[in-house]
Image (cartoon, rainbow, N blue to C red):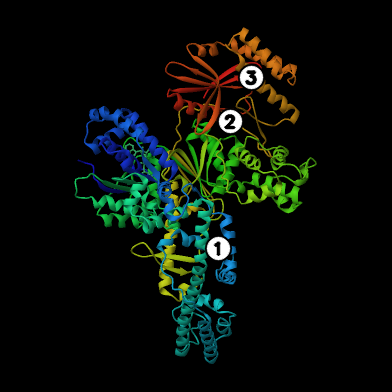
Amino acid sequence: MSFKPFLAYSASAGSGKTFALSVRYISLLFMGESPSSILAATFTNKAASEMRQRVVDSLRNLERDEAFLNAICEQTELSREELLDKQPEVLAKFLASISHIVTLDSFFSSILRAAALEIGLEPDFVTKEQGDDALERHFLNEVQAQGLLSSLVKLAMDIEDKRFSKIFDLMQGFYTVDPLLPEVQKIQHSVQSVEEHCESLRLEMMKALKDAGSADRCIKQFETQSIKELFGKKLFENEMLGEHSWFKKSINNEIEEVYARLKEALKLWGKSKEQVVLYNLFKIYDYYKNATIANAKFSGILSFDDLTYFTYRLLHESISSEFLYFKIDAKFKHILLDEFQDTSTLQFLLLKPLIDEIFAGQGQSEFKSFFYVGDTKQSLYRFRGGVEELFDKVAEHYGITIEPMDTNYRSCRHVVEQVNRWFEPTMTGYIPQKSRSGAKEGFVEVVESDEVIDEAVKQAQNLIQLGVDVDDIAFLVSTNKDGQQLQEACEYAGIDTLLKTSSSLKTLPKIATLVAMMEYLYLGDRIDAEALMIRINKSLDDIDLNWYSPLMQPLKILDRLVREFGYFEEDKNILKLLEFAGSFGDIPTFIKEFKSSSIGVAEHSVHGANIMTIHGSKGLEFGYVIVLDKLTRPNSDKSPLIFHYDENLSVEEILYRISGRDHFDEHYARLIASRKLSEIKDRKNVLYVALTRAVEGMIIIRKEKDSIFDEVGVSPMKIGEIKVSQPVFDIQKKEKKSHLVRLSHYGTQEILKEQEDEEKDLQAILFGSALHYTLEMMVRFDLSSLSKALISMQNRYGQQLDMHHAVQIEARIKMLIVHEGFQKLLQGAQVSKERAFAYDGELKQVDLLLEYEDSCLVIDYKSSKKYDLKHHVQVQGYKKALAKLMRKPTKGLILYLLEDAIELIEV
Ligand SMILES: Nc1ncnc2c1ncn2[C@@H]1O[C@H](COP(=O)(O)OP(=O)(O)OP(=O)(O)O)[C@@H](O)[C@H]1O
């Protein structure tokens, strides 16, 4: 049998690790294993749902997926015929069973839910991504009640940053790896005697220097006001003081001897400071931890750190794995783990009892397996206790063979080769990848520009113009904030986007401004509102606020402000804000609750160019990738604490970072140096992930200075060419406007950028709506149906619609009725109008759907050609969605009902 039960793949991006995992999963099904006995864990929800989909799709269309079918044949040693024969039965069994294709977090959450009561947690808890302000308040109250506020203030002083929020971060850092923390001695240390000793040596040094007739500038080096100042002196980087050019002349044995003692005393000072800081931190950490646990239990809202912590407590202290299996009503015989390089030690410890169980049965007749895949070059989560050594340690511990894979199945040849060129010289242990035979050439381009966002938008417009489907484009950015900025620019340029970030609604400038305006109206607090208005290019004086009364409901006020600001009511983030505001009767409660809320940013549409952070793109692939330089300066890790892991991957010691400490303490210097190397490696890993996502082509936009790409020597270049089928249409050049773009919906899906005054716009909206309505009301596309539909339209719109527009509607539809091309399309088609369908959780509606025997055609009516690009992108989205839903090849058309012509444009 070629199925190796215990196996790991350590291989580069795109080499088919996830593919191999899916093959293995399905092979197990064909080998008769029950879906409920297999645990397959991936890193993101998206990856998990893609894997589930892949399993179902492959089981449905096995014969169409040659590569997959061959791989399953090889794994199972079954012939094609045997597999195809078994396929319906395996599919039926899979669909009827509970499968466990999950993220580790959701798996832990299900474990915890099943046995929550064992540790005093209500099983209906919910999980969320970020910590909340309530916890900080709760904790501060607790600290104050315990009389520990002075410890907190002292800590804030000791920690260079001097902000309380830094202390929260540090404690959250402890909590993330809590079970791995070392025992910290609960002895109160003092630095006073050490400081006194340092001080007397400093004075001794000054005297010795004076006695030796040293120059003033030498003596001045020791004229410091505090030990901290002395500690930070650069001269201590010298092992002997005589190595310093200033001191050469007057150096003598006595001075060197005092210097050595002073260095030793300062080393001790650093250590004592560390002990004091850690002692104080751990003292308050107990309260922080208790506050966190109490807060989670009380609110029923768990962060991912809470989830890991509680699951650890549950599995390691409260119940046995036998009891766990009983509780979750499953027993895993096979475990498959994806992206293993980012599994934290703690997460692994949570899985370990289940893996041990598999190995415990080894040698007996029962068929069990364990398989994991990963790439340490893509390890991104060191900060949350991800330790890349875990990959090898696990293999060693269980005696698992790690196999390499050397061919890239994802990217075109130029991407694979260029990535090799960048990383081979700059990344230790990098093994160049081969391109698969028959890979397309593709293209890679590096553009240098300090207007990163504008350039990215320009490049995307160019791709779209060349015929690239907007859904196949992905922008990769460094931060959520960069993503938001880019999204606004894309929206402005008429490119639909899908923003996949974890940002909170509060952080969006539009939303923040609306709420600040409410505060201004209610409390008269002008400063915040004014500052935010400037950010969105407006001034308080531009806005008419005479309608306001303090008794108005928050929803009413926001609704009015949205209109005053000319915002788009259909903007989903604005809708989310309005929805939230709807549940409050008074302004102050709304403001208070909004500020402590953690409502996430809405996704903008079901299709469009993806915008995501590089971290979020891990494991994914896209046709065309545009990687953006970081908009802000790259920041280095300035955490005041350094965690050092031991052989068993527990935290062996925690070091306190003080600048200059490496001059005195060799052990500290060694760890700091290795930490710096890790930071560089982490940054390169991020770049490696970003530069390995593209299938057809990649564009990189780098800044001239301070570029994140400098690390691997990415400089302007171009290889290959963008080759896409036919250019489909011309992008209309849009002039940039200095004021905010205002969007309105009219018709069913028609989108208009407002350029005229409000009066004209209202008529345009009515015209679009009435035209759509008339077309909707026509039973058939003939003159008698038209005259009936026109009556319905007059009943509905007659009062407001211009006479001239009513005439136009009739004339345009008459032209359509006699249009030969259009009538031809109707032949043999089942016609549905205003067909609604749900796709990706959203309700969509198309104007006209023509269903033929073996294909479909989706038609979208437009009354003007002003916004070609937007129309085009929109119809592409419908086409894609309907092709999936109808399971038939689906074409798309934009039908322009213009004043003097009917035009049909294929999309
Ligand atoms: N043996 C194969 N034959 C054909 N196509 C393959 C094969 N292996 C992988 N692929 C395809 O290559 C692409 C990359 O594969 P996959 O996502 O599994 O790589 P990966 O190693 O998991 O990448 P990453 O490290 O970036 O997560 C996918 O589109 C996959 O379907």
Residue 693 at x, y = what percent? 43, 43
Decide: few, some or many residues near mark 1? Use Cα within 10 Å; few <14, some 14-19, many ≥20. some
Residue 329 at x, y = what percent? 35, 44
**Residue ID for mark 3:** 773
Say whether residue 313 is left or right of residue 363. Answer: right
Say whether residue 106 is left or right of residue 15. Answer: right
SS label for mark 1: helix
Tag 2: residue type?
A: Lys
Q: Residue at x 71, y 18 (%)?
A: 805
**Label 1, label 3: how many angstroms apart (C-alpha)?**
59 Å
Ligand 1, image quadrant it occupies = top left
Tag 3: residue type?
A: Tyr
Q: Is residue 637 above or below residue 370?
A: below
Dot 1 and dot 3 residues touching (CB under 8 Å): no
Q: Is residue 355 above or below residue 219?
A: above
SS label for mark 3: helix
Q: Residue at x 47, y 11 (%)?
A: 828
**Residue ID for mark 2:** 870
As rendered, which of 438 and 833 lies closer to the eye? 833
Residue 627 at x, y = what percent? 49, 45
